Image: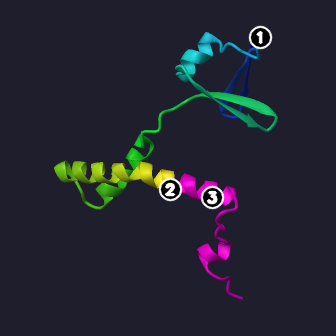
Amino acid sequence: MLKSTVGSSSMERKIISVSGKRQITIPQKYFEALGFSNEAECILQNNAIVIRPIRENTGNEFSEQILTDLIAQGFSGQELLVKFKEMSKKVAPAMNKLIDDADSLAKGEKKGATMADIFGAEEK
């Protein structure tokens, strides 16, 4: 096993076998450290295969940002809890809309915004 440090991140390298059926076994240490369950996501990126655990998207990724915004608006106590629940329910539909829009753009079904659309025309 080879370990190295690049910047602030560390990297550990291990050679694994590929079976005749193109199957691999994730080393137990890696499996446990990354929290794998019964499924993994496999991505082809820059001439490399990235295998990572599937993370269930519960919308909780935005909890801290939602709470920070609501507290800044002056909500607290029970009112904060009610508003937080309202806002949290809006995250998944908003993400699904973004994904649908991205898919439409990728398929050429929809025209993307230009910099001028977003920031206005450049003044000379």
Q: Residue at x 77, y 11 (%)?
A: 19
Tell me the quarter of the image containing the C terminus.
bottom right
Residue type at numbered disc 3? Ser
User: What type is the residue that disc 1 sits on?
Assistant: Ser
Instruction: Choose the circle earlier in sequence order: 1 or 3.
Output: 1
Indicate the position of residue 5 as horizontal and vertical percent values: 71, 26
C-alpha gap between disc 1 and disc 3: 39 Å
Location of mark 2 (residue): 97
| Cα–Cα gap, marks 2 and 3 | 10 Å
- In this picture the colour scheme is rainbow
CA gap, disc 2 and disc 1: 40 Å
Helix, strand or loop under label 1: loop
* In the image, residue 62 above or below residue 21: below
Residue segment shown in magenta: 98-124
Residue type, mark 2 in image:
Lys
Residue at 67% across / 26% down in the picture? 10
Quadrant housing the N terminus: top right
Q: Is residue 119 left or right of residue 61?
A: right
Name the residue nearer the viewer: 48 or 9.
Answer: 48
